[in-house]
Image (cartoon, rainbow, N blue to C red):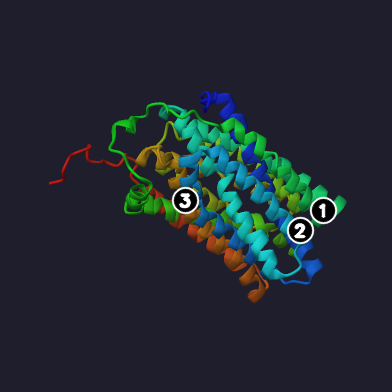
Amino acid sequence: MTIASPAPSLRQLLLCGAAIGALSMGVRHGFGLFQAPITMDHGWSREPFSLAMAVQNLAWGLAGPVVGMLADRFGAWRTLIVSALLYALGLVAMALTTSPMTFLLGAGVLIGVAQAGCTYAVIFGVLARQVPAERRSWAMGTAAAAGSFGQFLMMPVSNWLIESVGWQNALQLLALAVCLIVPLALGLREPPAQPQTPEANAPPQRAGAALREAMGYRSFQLLMLGYLVCGFQVVFIGVHLPAFLKDSGLSSHVAPAALALIGLFNVVGTYAAGALGQRWPRRYLLAGIYSARALAIACFISLPLSPLSVYVFASVMGLLWLSTVPPTNAIVAQLFGVKHLSMLSGLVFLGHQIGSFMGVWLGGRLYDLQGSYTLVWWLTVALGLISAGLNLSLREDPVQRLPAGAVSA
């Protein structure tokens, strides 16, 4: 006999979702701090590390729609538990590997697939099904903002662990921390019978049909392309900023402080984006975010570099860091409904992760070729302006489907 789970409260959803996001994203946010000690200890150039991080992001994106479909069908909490265990295993493999290939498999493939199942796409699917549409963007922004605090918290923790116990032991301790997602996932269990939603009277739609519909819809295509730029920018900065600052002669403490500031201001920016997404057209909000990023990066690389300029840049970028996430996912829910939201959020996130792959890999590749990150910095500026234009062209009206039994003319 199966006992139905009671509907989780909004507080429970937000607390558990935020804690899961804080752990999964917080650990990931600190990977850039491991680049220097790992490459120096193994005698590698920066490209093997960059390639592994690039593959990690690509694997995350490719696995996203599949993992989202499994979460929509079998329950987000089950997906989160399996993914957390894979995440921990990948961190251990990252610590113990001694060759670029095994590092690529552990840090790249295994962790990438795991992240697809224990980050925001799966969490947002639960929120969208349990929260009324008029509060959906706010709920997503609140969960993402609270989770973003983990990026602020975990950055100094990761740096302290590296300095105190070495990078290998630090990774293994982080693997234990990620296992805390397992009990937290139980707080996202949903009842079998879902609340009625506006699209409940629409004809039944299978996962394959939902995928085809989304991929053939112009606004979804534009949203994916815009999200590609988001991935390029944030992952390039997150992974390569520490090395860029070290090359520029700044103290080793500047980079962890900068990444921590990104995480701290990300809390404010992500919450604000979720709240504003309930009031403003989300396409204008996204266009403004990408334009502001382009301006901030252009100023950063054009002005003299100092600890103060780094901290100001990190604070501004923090406000814009994950602020694209709530409006992007809210647009997907508005366009297609919530039945397959985890899968479709994973699909749109594939665009983000293709951009992440390009940003982190090109950063290492062009640095090895030119000895400088200058070209990639300016590329992030140009792409930000392009993405702003793409998002201005979006339509946010829900797709129109034929009623059950209707025949098109």
Q: Which residue is mark 1?
A: 169
- As displayed, is residue 181 above or below residue 107? above
Q: Residue at x 66, y 58 (%)?
A: 239
- As displayed, is residue 212 above or below residue 322? below
Image check: 130 left or right of 110? Answer: left
Disc 2 versus disc 1: distance between alpha carbons? Answer: 7 Å
Where residue 25 sits in the image (x, y, percent)? 64, 45
User: Residue 29, can we see it?
Assistant: no
Disc 1 versus disc 3: distance between alpha carbons? Answer: 33 Å
- As displayed, is residue 349 above or below residue 44? above
Image check: 189 left or right of 193? Answer: right
- Quadrant in the rendering for residue 248: bottom right
Which element is circle 1 on? helix
Q: Which residue is mark 3?
A: 65
Going from the N terminus, do you reach mark 1 or mark 3 first?
A: 3
Q: Are marks 2 and 1 in contact (CB under 8 Å)?
A: yes
Residue 95 is tagged as: 2
**Pointer 1 local density, CA inside 10 Å: few below 14, some 14–19, many at least 20:** some
